Amino acid sequence: MTTRQEQYIRDNILPGQVLRLFCQFTTPAKNKHLLLVGIEPSPLLFMVNSQIHPYVRSRAHLKSCQVLLKASEHFFLAHDSYVDCRNVCTNFSLDDLIMQVHRDARRLKGFINEEAQEQVIAAIKACPVLEKHYQNLILAELAELEAF
């Protein structure tokens, strides 16, 4: 990969963006949508799921950590989906993201809209099970961005 290509990809991987990444850690391993919510010191992502797990749905304190992404407002989604703000995915380095996007630029899906951004921030602040360390890192980074 040339330096120019790498820099272009680095410049275009930003918090608030949904990426479709190959996830070795899922069973089975597969491509999944993830919402990038932090880059420094390493990428922090939330899973985007097509459904809310029944366990989560039946518990208000966990359901409040789910943010609806309407397919009608996010062109890159085939159906309504949910950002799970309970657990931070830290399985990828920035180099991993760059490598996957370099191989297939279609992995950069697009940004969530302003309403969803506000809901994600509210969910992060209110989520009782999100580790405080990650909560603080994410909120500090998002506060610095105009997009969020």
Image: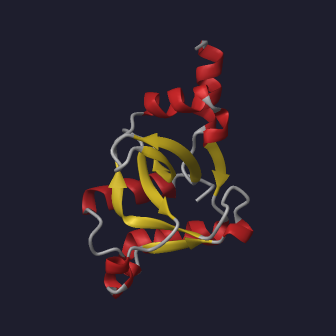
Residue positioned most to the top: 2
Would you say 125 lies left or right of 97 here? Answer: left
Give x and y (percent) for residue 120: 50, 68
Choose between 132 and 32: the one closer to the eye.
32
**Residue 142 shows in this picture:** yes
Query: Residue at point 64% right, 67% down?
Result: 79
Give x and y (percent) for residue 77: 66, 60
Reply above or below: 8 against 54. above
Query: Residue at point 48% right, 68% down?
Result: 121
Give x and y (percent) for residue 19: 56, 46
The colour scheme is: secondary structure
Choose between 133 and 2: the one closer to the eye.
2
Q: Which quarter of the picture shows residue 131?
A: bottom left
Give x and y (percent) for residue 142: 49, 56
**Residue 136 shows in this picture:** no
Reply above or below: 107 against 9. below
Residue positioned most to the front: 28
Query: Residue at point 63% right, 37% down?
Result: 12
Placement of the C terminus among the 4 image quadrants: bottom right
Query: Residue at point 31% right, 79% down?
Result: 55
Q: Which quarter of the picture shows residue 64?
A: bottom left
Would you say 45 lies left or right of 135 here? Answer: right
Q: How many numbered badges does the structure rendering display?
A: 0
Placement of the N terminus among the 4 image quadrants: top right
Reply above or below: 100 against 49. above
Reply above or below: 11 against 147. above
Q: Which quarter of the picture shows residue 136?
A: bottom left
